[in-house]
Image: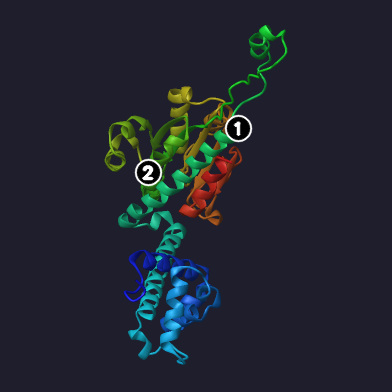
Amino acid sequence: NEANGPSAEDIREAGDTIDDFLESLPEETLSTRSVHDIANIILDDESLASSSGALGMMIMNARTRRGRSESVGEDQEDNDTVRFIIGRVRRRIRERNIGRSIRRREEYLLNKYIYQLKPAEVQEMRELVRRFGQKLKNRISLRKKRVKHGGLDVKRTFRSNLAHGGIPFRLYFRDKKIDRPQLVVLCDISSSVNQYSRFMLLLTYTLQGLFSKVRTFAFISNMVEITPLFMEMDPERALNSIFTDTSFTYGFGSNYGRCFDQFVDGYSDSLGRKTTVLVLGDARNNNQDPGIDSFMRIKESSRNIFWLNPDRRHLWDWSDSIAGLYAAHCTEMKEVNNFLDLSEFIDKLFK
């Protein structure tokens, strides 16, 4: 059997051992050393050579064959074991390079201004959003498992143990509920924040399963509920429908005050003590009535009100921006112009 060389199972086992060993090497080793140098490290590693596994046996045979040679040169490339190790090292370096490229691409997208994302990049971001949503779902699920029950249900425990003279042989606990927040989204879809709004609405659609209830409204100078659109259509069609609908406009440009007035008059039933309100927009009101009384009523009728503003903070209250006026009545107004900022904010909501 030894004359026929290692079996397929031996080769798989040896390959796994090499992969584990390469995984333990510092990043710079795989980046700066040549393939042959790394193969030499494996062949000369005493712990691998003395192991009882298939790789140890292959290394010992290779050492015997290569005799006194101090490097993995051309003469040794004929050795099956050496060629096998070199091939494995090359594959792992290739995988690491691909992995680095993917990580660099993801970091670029995470930090790029949302309003600068190209349509193809928005499609790429969908996978990052999906993974982020899954991470949050897993966290909520884990929290439910950790909190299995509420406090002791004294009445039920006593009634169920009457047969034992009231001695509590078995304890009963009240059900413990992990309350998921309700969400109301008010999204400015005017041309100044068009790309930002598209991405934010896509994110809202993707993450809506994390909330017990979601109602979504879009506005320019009219407030319109768009919740049914996301129930009836796929998100892309819904977004295209929203951004071509003329019912959002009345007059010229954004009118936050008018829209907050309309929300209070027509949609106050969407608010409650469990509701988090999320306003998405740049707070540029075209020098019109800000509707502060209505905005304060929205705040008073909900649990929290957060405002995510795509403008850089130094531009707040500049020109027609009245961000500071609204910020004074928010739980928090936050500068959010890339997905990294956004994910940190949403992550905080579920802690």
- Expressed as whole percent of the image width and height from the top left, the position of residue 156 reads 64, 12
Say if 306 sits above or below 63 in the image.
above
Specify whether 327 is left or right of 103.
right
Q: Which residue is mark 1?
A: 147
Query: Splitting the image into 4 quarters, where does residue 258 fall?
Result: top left
Query: Splitting the image into 4 quarters, where does residue 87 fall?
Result: bottom left
Q: Determine the residue positioned at 55% across, 54% down.
A: 313
Residue 61 visible in the shown view: yes
- Expressed as whole percent of the image width and height from the top left, the position of residue 208 reads 42, 36
Q: Do the residues under discs 1 and 2 have CB atoms within 8 angstroms?
A: no
Q: Quadrant of the N terminus?
A: bottom left
Q: Determine the residue positioned at 55% across, 36% down.
A: 305
Label 1, secondary structure: give it.
Answer: loop
Judge by depth and name the residue closer to the eye, 227 or 262.
227
Determine crowd level at label 2: few under 14, some 14-19, many 20+ residues with C-alpha closer than 10 A: some
Judge by depth and name the residue closer to the eye, 222 or 224.
224
Q: Amino acid at mark 2?
A: Leu
Q: CA distance from mark 1 to mark 2?
A: 32 Å
Determine crowd level at label 1: few under 14, some 14-19, many 20+ residues with C-alpha closer than 10 A: few
Say if 89 sits above or below 99 in the image.
below
- Expressed as whole percent of the image width and height from the top left, the position of residue 2 reads 37, 74
- Of mark 1 and mark 2, the one earlier in the sequence is 1
Query: Splitting the image into 4 quarters, where does residue 263 fall?
Result: top left
Q: Which residue is mark 2?
A: 202
| Total labels drawn | 2
Circle nearer the viewer, 1 or 2: 1
